[in-house]
Amino acid sequence: MINFLNATFIKSCPNRDERPQGQKPEVLIVGRSNVGKSSLINALTQRKKLAFTSSKPGHTRLLNYYDIDGQFYLVDAPGYGYAKGGIDLDKLFAEMMESYFADNKELKLVLILLDARRELNVDDIEIIDYVKENEIPFAVVITKCDKVNQKERAALNKHLKEMELTNEQVYFTSAMNGQTLSLLKKGIEKSL
């Protein structure tokens, strides 16, 4: 069993070629800018400041590697979508991810984060289609579930069914709900 509390930030890299020494399985976290990637990392590890959270979208611009219990790397990718300051996050994400995915034998799972309060956009659908087409194991992690009502959740479920995602591929999470995080941790362990 993996102890997610035993977590250490290792390094930030502009590309996969500069990843940490010593090969370990990798779980990649991707999602729209401001979807809650850093908050999810902090919640999974029960560390408030392991991953830097920012109110400004587009803060993460490098691949951030976190060692989890010496068992695997949790890799936080830059967000796609909106950022202040004229940064083209989509271009940055596309270039970085193309090199990251290329012949990556360490990659065991991609966690695609979606905000429960937002409609899926073209970028979200493209990344889901990409991992499906390339037969990369993935799971969709719905964040901020504590902030939606039943009607919004029903609409989200309908949209996920249209994407032909199975119940095993979708995790509904809230940083405030340890039970949802435990289910996600079990899913990550199973993928490794």
Image (cartoon, helix red, strand yellow):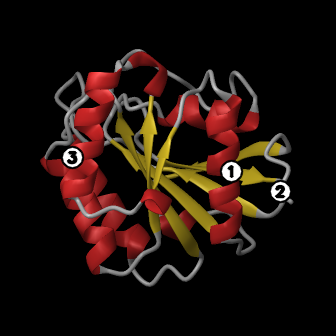
The first of marks 2 and 1 along the sequence is: 2
Q: Which residue is mark 2?
A: 2
- Which disc, if any, is residue 159? 3
Going 44% across and 57% down the picture, which residue do you hit?
167
Cα gap from disc 2 to disc 1, whole angstroms: 9 Å
Q: Which residue is mark 1?
A: 185
Q: Quadrant of the N terminus?
A: bottom right
| Residue 91 shows up from this direction | no
Can you give x and y, in whole percent of width and height, for residue 111 in the image?
47, 54
Residue 12 as seen in the image, left or right of residue 151: right
* Nearer to us: label 1 or label 3: 3
Report helix, strand or loop for mark 2.
Answer: loop
Amino acid type of the residue tagged 1 in the rendering: Lys
The first of marks 1 and 3 along the sequence is: 3
Amino acid type of the residue tagged 3 in the rendering: His
The first of marks 3 and 2 along the sequence is: 2
Can you give x and y, in whole percent of width and height, for residue 87 in the image?
22, 34
Can you give x and y, in whole percent of width and height, for residue 160 in the image?
27, 50
Q: Quadrant of the C terminus?
A: bottom right
- Which disc, if any, is residue 7? none
Residue 174 as seen in the image, left or right of residue 125: right
